[in-house]
Amino acid sequence: MQVATLHMNIVMQLEAADALEWALFVAMHLPDPDARQAVVRGLVDRHGPACADMSPQQHALLASLNVPRAWVAASLATWAAYAGDHAGIGMSVACRVFGSSAIQMS
């Protein structure tokens, strides 16, 4: 079995077990950078609300794994658009994820 296949099997099992942080951990170790980006972004996209509701420790884990904040923000924006509350949900989620001091109002 190839390394990437083994990684993907573990990622899928962890995702099915609602262990998103660990699925991301394994996905960030995929050897191919393009596959790594696709898998990590897919996980974040599928679990956008869960990413918003993560504890500070879980957000620290995302940061330590070098999951780009832009990927999380893009996923949260997609979820906000889906929910139909572009300003309210998007702003509250962004504040929870990045902190209110990181949000600039014009």
Image (cartoon, helix red, strand yellow):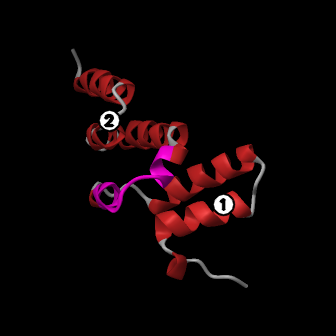
84 sits to left or right of 66: right
- Looking at the image, is mark 1 or mark 2 earlier in the sequence? 2
**Location of residue 6 (image quadrant):** top left
Q: Position of residue 4 (x, y in %)?
A: 29, 27
Badge 1: residue crowd in 10 Å (few <14, some 14–19, many ≥20): many
Amino acid type indicated by mark 1 = Gly
Q: Which residues are magenta?
A: 50-63
Residue 29 position (above or below residue 93): above
Please name the residue shown 58% across and 77% down the image: 103
Give the residue at the far right of this rendering: 84
Residue corresponding to mark 2: 19
74 sits to left or right of 62: right
Label 1 SS: helix
Q: Nearer the viewer, residue 50 or 12?
A: 50
Label 2 SS: loop
Quadrant location of the C terminus? bottom right
Badge 2: residue crowd in 10 Å (few <14, some 14–19, many ≥20): some
Residue 46 position (above or below residue 67): above
Give the residue at the far bottom of this rendering: 106
Quadrant location of the N terminus? top left
Amino acid type indicated by mark 2 = Ala
Please name the residue shown 41% across and 36% down the image: 35
Residue 106 position (above or below residue 83): below
**Location of residue 28 (image quadrant):** top left
Q: CA distance from mark 1 to mark 2?
A: 25 Å
Q: Position of residue 34 (x, y in %)?
A: 42, 41
Which dot marks residue 90?
1
Residue 46 position (above or below residue 75): above
Q: Please check the rendered image and state whether residue 54 is part of the magenta-colored stretch, yes or no.
A: yes
Q: Please check the rendered image and state whether residue 4 is part of the magenta-colored stretch, yes or no.
A: no
Which dot marks residue 36?
none
